[in-house]
Image: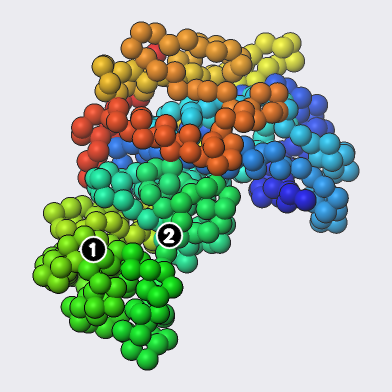
Amino acid sequence: MTASTALLTDRYELTMLDAALHAGTHERESVFEVFGRSLPGSRRYGVFAGVGRLLEAIEQFRFGDAELGWLSENAVVSPEALDYLADYRFGGDIRGYREGELYFPGSPLLVVQGSFAEAVLLETLVLSVLNYDSAVATAAARMVSAAGTRPLAEMGSRRTGEWSAVAAARAAWIAGFAATSNLEAGRRWSVPTMGTAAHAFTLLHDDEEQAFRAQVDRLGPGTTLLVDTFDVPTAVRRAVEVAGTGLGAVRIDSGDLPIVVAETRELLDSLGATNTRITVTNDLDEYGIAILSASPVDSYGVGTSVVTGSGHPAAGMVYKLVAHRDDTGAWVNVAKKSTSKASVAGSKHAFRRLEGDTATAELIRIDRADAREQADAADGERVLHVPLVSRGIADPRWLGAAGTAAAREHHAAVVRELPRDGLRLSQGDPAIPTLYV
């Protein structure tokens, strides 16, 4: 049986529902919007990720006997609210940016329409998935940009929570990473997996040569041997002696990388292992990768900086009510006016303005109250919203391994639309402006 996601939420989602039930306003048709007021870390673009995971989590947002029993025992909500929750199924509509799409400040990333009760309950779940996955994907995309044509592997599972590790591997792959070390991400989302041996394997054996030989005997000469447990030049020589000049790769996980990599390349070539690749995995981020751009590195492994907050500032997305029907059935646009936390009232549609193949602006139109109405693009514009959920049913195009692969493809296409300055790693203004039209 699939685990419920219903209690992966904040208490106030349920107390709002309870109070709205008592006031008789819970059935008011409402429109909620997900957006970010700024880009994380003053970066120049964001990458929207987590949609496929979110749609599955919404499908699993059910209050079974265990959840209802706990809520009742702890007097979280009234008996009337418990009765409502027992039959809860999200039956509304969701449209939004495709997974893998680029976004900018104010982008209406997700538009959720349904009754207040069914839509407000999703707030925490929506934000917890989208904020984490988008932060990882944004950091990963910058690393991909810095790496150029050299592949990157995500290997940060030991630096975050066990299920966050799976989400991070998926988000990094969508943003252009070539593989992950996380097997659950491979099983669940068909992300390619990689990995050979750690320092513990070398230290287990009587000497380094014995460890190399054991690995090559089992995995073949095309394997990757870790050469920095003791002395790198000595290990490189032993590696070639054991595997031959057809050795697949050596991995370096420490030291002054530009110097060590250059010396290793020279040594490998002198030993005849001219096709042996060099991969580096020493606490890299996009800046460390950029520093190595002139070095003879063939691939990178990235861990901490792609899965934890130290590498990716929080995306800071919020979930705000922007419109609802009143007792007469008329739409009322609403907005928060708090200083520095204001929102923009009304249901929105979003477009990317292009000149040729280059993006020049994010266009946001507030021209319809009903979020279910489809807006058309003008010449030179690309529609950014697609249907994600219709009457409670998720669009299968965005689900599972196939949806994840589609997100990766979409990201690869749209990142090519960025103006050249948009790929700079330094902090600065967004790559394109956001315009309300």
Residue, x 21% and y 60% (percent of image)?
275
* Amino acid type, residue under disc 1 in the picture: Thr
Asked if residue 370 shows in the view, the reply is yes
Color theme of the render: rainbow
| 184 up-or-down from 238: above or below | above
| Towards the viewer: 27 or 349 | 349
Mark 1, other Cα within 10 Å: few <14 / some 14–19 / many ≥20 = many
Q: Quadrant of the C terminus?
A: top left
Find residue 62 and report its horizontal and vertical position in percent.
76, 42
Residue, x 22% and y 68% (percent of image)?
245
- Disc number lying in front (2 or 1): 1
**Residue under numbered circle 1:** 276
Residue, x 20% and y 34% (percent of image)?
421
**Residue under numbered circle 2:** 194
Mark 2, other Cα within 10 Å: few <14 / some 14–19 / many ≥20 = some
Q: Using the numbered discs, state the Cα–Cα distance from disc 2 to disc 1 in whole angstroms.
A: 17 Å
Name the element at disc 1.
Answer: loop
Find residue 233 and report its horizontal and vertical position in percent.
18, 78
- The quarter holding residue 306 reads bottom left
| Towards the viewer: 260 or 38 | 260
Residue 370: give its label.
none
